Amino acid sequence: MTAPGFYVGIRTTVTVTATHSDGTPIAGSAIKLDGTGGIKNQSTATDSDGKASFTIHATKPGAKFTVSGEGCGPKTFRSRPSLDCSGVDVSPKSLVTWQWTMMTITLRLLAQPVTNVKVVVTGAGINASGITNDAGRVRLKVIARKRGIFKISAPGALACSKQSGAAPRR
């Protein structure tokens, strides 16, 4: 069974292969997937190659799913936050203190938008949050109340954060 890149906020295809003890595929075997954290419960039968596929979309940190089939015990998989922050983009890159600014934050992971996850901006006197849309984007109206560094994070979806700065008006 494979669940590559099982992260919160992106769609993932889970493929289950059912085989006899000698390795030959089991066609028509009932496979069930039970999920939490936004993952919908699903069931299907294996094809002639013994394979069954499910598309899952975890929307909450700590999401998990359990796959079970006829004649085999259940196996549980848990989401994990991504260590890759290369898909975090913020515009504008820096802020001017005491000036309201519309900030756009975009999250992408494994070439997909990270959807329906909470994004938090803290530091430099900013404390704002919002939920990403279907494009992996959130727009926040913020004001930096002091100069310094602000941090952009997505708790439970990303195990990293992006930093930028706020400076006084010149």
Image: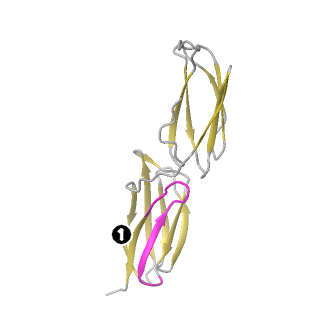
User: Looking at the image, can residue 153 be seen?
Assistant: yes
Q: Which residues are magenta?
A: 145-161
Q: Is residue 170 above or below residue 115?
A: below
Q: Can you give x and y, in whole percent of width and height, for residue 121 in the image? A: 50, 69
Q: Secondary structure at mark 1?
A: loop
Residue projecting furthest to the front:
22
Q: Can you give x and y, in whole percent of width and height, for residue 169 in the image? A: 35, 86
Image point (56%, 56%), residue name: 156
Residue 103 appears left or right of 65: left
Image point (43%, 81%), residue name: 99
For the residue pair 70 and 33, the one nearer the viewer reads as 70
- Which residue corresponds to mark 1? 93
For the residue pair 120 and 75, the one nearer the viewer reads as 75
Looking at the rendered structure, the kind of residue marked 1 is: Lys
> For residue 111: magenta?
no
Q: How is the image coloured?
A: secondary structure
Q: Quadrant of the C terminus?
A: bottom left
Quarter of image, res 56: top right
Q: Is residue 110 above or below residue 23?
A: below
> For residue 150: magenta?
yes
Q: Quadrant of the N terminus?
A: top right
Q: Can you give x and y, in whole percent of width and height, for residue 110 in the image? A: 41, 45
> How many numbered marks appear?
1
Q: Is residue 5 above or below residue 51?
A: below
Image point (48%, 76%), residue name: 123
Quarter of image, res 33: top right
Q: Is residue 147 above or below residue 36?
A: below
Residue 94 appears left or right of 32: left
Q: Residues within 10 Å of mark 1 (few under 14, many from 20)?
A: few
User: Looking at the image, can residue 39 be seen?
Assistant: no
